[in-house]
Image (cartoon, rainbow, N blue to C red):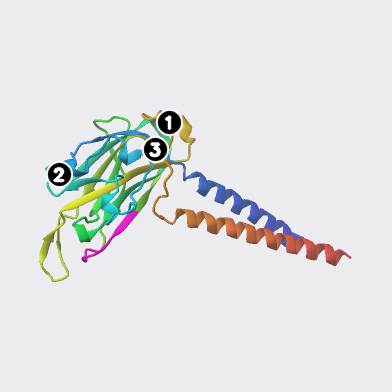
Amino acid sequence: MKKLLLLTIALVLLISFTVNVAAEESVISNGSSYSLITTPSASYADDGKKLTDGVFGTIPDGGTGYYSSNAYIGFTDENVDADGNIVIILDLGKEYTNITKMGIGYLNETSVGIYAPKTVRFEISNDRADGYSEAGTLTTAKETESGLSQTYADTVETRSLSGRYVRITITPLAEFTNADGNPERAEWTFIDEITVFADEDTSEAESSDPESEPENEKPQTGDDLEVFAFVLLALSSLAMLVALFVRSRNNEY
């Protein structure tokens, strides 16, 4: 009977933890306004919505690569600030008090001169112009060999931060050494989405764009697999609980 009680407690804790993990997946950035402090290339320009519309880049029908998707905005190696970076400021519409993750979608399509950035730094503040504190930094550099065609969506944990404005600083790959040992320069940096997650009802955010979110499958980040694993573990524990209960009842007779 003691084992049965312990297993019941463990099952309750597992289910509770699984629910908490799933709750962290609430996206609060969809439809948010943002400012491109660094101007992108006119050839792959922004429409003011691409980075928060929930749409990740895919290879369109008849397309030759991800870069032909309208979801991306592109920066050349000349579209950078004095420090060699690309800077974007995202306005969440109000202060959030429990921000758990921040992420970015980007492209590594070396066959057409597009390379994943070197790093992406996230900072947060309640003042758009000042007072930013670091939320986390992603190391996003990928393989640079010729012929690659890969899209990514990476996130960083942010320790339940609070704030309204998110400043994203993207450092392009710039110069690197190619497979032949010769110096080469990354010509393009492509990004398609910026995401911010919080343990809060997304309907409370004052979005700058009330339109409904487009339906599109985002690149696999591994978070859904984590939730699935916990659910599977909880179900397994439930099966063990039932088996022990049946065995206990049989022993009584």
Q: Amino acid at mark 2?
A: Asn
Task: State if disc 1 and disc 3 touch (CB < 8 Å).
Answer: no
Q: Are marks 2 and 3 in contact (CB under 8 Å)?
A: no
221 or 108: nearer the viewer: 108
- For marks 2 and 1, give the CA distance: 32 Å
Looking at numbered disc 3 in the image, what kind of residue is underneath it? Asn
Q: Position of residue 210 (x, y in %)?
A: 41, 29
Within 10 Å of disc 3 (Cα), the crowding (few <14, some 14-19, many 20+) is: many
Q: In what element is the residue under mark 2? A: loop
**Count of labels shown?**
3
The image shows residue 229, relative to residue 159, as above or below, that is: below
Q: In percent of the image, x 27 and y 33: which residue is there? A: 131
Q: Magenta residues?
A: 143-152
Left or right placement of residue 209 versus residue 244 in this view: left
Q: Which is more N-terminal, label 3 or label 2?
A: 3
Q: Which residue is mark 1?
A: 205
Comparing labels 2 and 1, the label whose residue is closer to the camera: 2
Q: Residue placed at 28% from the left, 56% from the top?
A: 65
> Tag 1: residue type?
Ala
Residue 139 position within the rendered picture, expressed as x and y whole percent measured from the top left: 28, 55
Asked whether, in this view, residue 27 is left or right of residue 244, the answer is left
Q: Which residue is mark 2?
A: 79
Numbered disc 1: secondary structure:
loop
